[in-house]
Every structure is written in C-alpha cells, then in structure tokens.
Amino acid sequence: RILRTHVLRPTWHFVTPQDIRWMLALTAPRVHKLNDSTYRIQGIDSEVYKRSRKIIVKALQGEKQLTRDELASLFESSGIKIDNGLRLAYIIMRAELDGIICSGPRRGKQFTYMLLDERAPASNTLTKSEALAELAARYFTSRGPASVKDFAGWSGLSMADARTALEAVNNKLESEEINGQTCWFPQTRTRGLPKSPFVYLLSIYDEYISGYKDRTAMDAGFSMQLFAMGNALQFIIVMDGLVVGTWKRTIKKDAVLIELNYFKKLSRPEKLAVVNAADRYGEFLGLP
C-alpha cells in the first residue's frame, strides 16, 4: 500500500505506511513554519483549525473515505467558509502534516481522505537522530552524487539538520569534488549506464529534477529556453542525462499522442531513442 500526503516540503509525496509517521515528525514542523503566512492570510487560526479538525475526525471515523469536495461541503455546512480552493487546500494540508489524515483509496479518478490512525495504525516511530540518519541514507544512496545543499532542498530540512544527517552516514558513502561542491554517493554502484543514446520522457516534477537544488549537471545549454516557457513547461526530454527538449501528451480513448519539441537537431539514432521512450510510455499506459 502506498499513501499520498504532504511531507518533506509543502507538496505531496508518496510514502509507505511504515515510514509516514517518522517522516511527518521530522519534517512537518518546518513545513508548518513555511506555511504560517498562508495560514494567516487564509484565516486558518487555531480556532478555525480546531473546528475543522473536529469535523474531519467525526466525518471519517469508522474507516470512512471522503473526497476533497465532500470535505469542503461539510466545512461549509458547519459554518466554516471555503471562499477559495487555497483555504481548503491549506486546511487539509495542515491536517495531513499533523498526522490526522492521509490518502484513502481512489474513487474512480478522485482521491479520497481517511484518518491516518485507521489507514496506517502500526507505522514506525524514530528519534530525531535516527530519522535524520535514515532520510540521509535513503537520499544519497538513491540520488547520489548529490551535495548537502541538494539534500536540504529535497528534504525541506534546515542546512544545520541536513549537515547533521549527512555526518551520521558519511562513513558509509563516498565523496568527490564536482564543480566546486562535495558530492556524496553510495560506495557500491552495481548498475552500469544504458547504451547511448538513451532517452527518458519525464515530468518536471520527476525526482531527476526535483531531487536536486543544483541542476547544472543536466543542462545541455538550453536553460534559457526552459526558463522562457515558465508555467507552460511540464514535460522534458532527457537524453544521456541532459535536457534536450520538451514534450506534450494528449490521451485519447484508444491512443496517446506525443508532441515533441527539440532544442537541437538530433541524429537518426537519437530520434530512434526518443521513439523508443515514447513506446515505453505508451506501454505503461496500455495505449499505442
């Protein structure tokens, strides 16, 4: 079972039931601090949140599952105004960060919420020192080479806590100076690189992007084109580790259509690698 909740940074992440409590205990206090100004602007003071929390718990007790819209209707009928989507989002996020709710089973295409105590009643707890070490070990062994700044940006931890976490596990890692930064990575690397050219069609929210503060290593000289796209940028073409273009998808009933935008002229083998990546994506969706 995989759960979806707000943890690490003010955004959703997928976590296992075994990890959700110690990760919330470690990172939620800092996310709350980042959210404080929005809580004030949206009028989510201690009294409003206390009432909202009581409504949520009462409505979900007994392993009930409600959608976001259904929770909004309950708030409105109980006198808590939901004037905009942002206020609702931050009430729900606050309840997630406090370990009151997490994702429930999907209802068709809609996400639902359940009480965390009923959805994951037996999840692990760790001390802060144990949690810091565990998070650092998982990050650097799965995403290294990476710097302590990358780790802090990904985890939402303060630089002080990020350094403490790294110090707890750096004897199990190797390090190397890369572009003036000390980067850490696992001592044993068994997987070789795929045969070049190899292409991935990724979202800008993929861990390959969001997992690092410094993304210069993946810049093939087209950062200005990406920056100019602003909010229109959603999907990127990554070839041999470098961003070389963007892509869009249109999902039809019986097919997925992919529109490609290259930042440079590709060779025939490179174009074939993009086609292979598109085929893999279609297979994943079960569509040609």
Image (cartoon, helix red, strand yellow):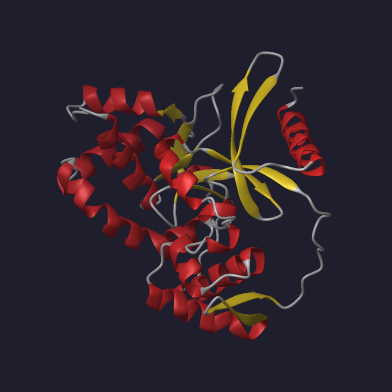
Quarter of the N terminus within the rendering: top right
Residue occupying image coordinates x 22% and y 54%? 36
Q: Is residue 276 above or below residue 19?
A: above
**In front of the other: 24 or 265:** 265
Residue occupying image coordinates x 29% and y 40%? 91
Q: Is 119 left or right of 268, judged from the image as shown?
A: left
Q: Is residue 62 in view?
A: no
- Residue 62 lies, in percent from the top left, at 46, 34
Q: Is 178 left or right of 225, judged from the image as shown?
A: right
Instruction: Spot the residue most to the top.
Output: 253
Quarter of the C terminus within the rendering: top right
Residue occupying image coordinates x 60% and y 22%? 250
Q: Is residue 13 in view?
A: yes
Q: Is 55 left or right of 191, judged from the image as shown?
A: left
**In front of the other: 199 or 78:** 199
Instruction: Spot the residue most to the front.
Output: 265
Residue occupying image coordinates x 67% and y 56%? 241
What is the tally of numbered marks visible in this picture?
A: 0
**In front of the other: 284 or 134:** 284
Q: Is residue 197 above or below residue 246?
A: below
- Residue 75 lies, in percent from the top left, at 25, 28
Q: Is residue 63 above or below residue 214?
A: above
- Residue 174 lies, in percent from the top left, at 66, 81
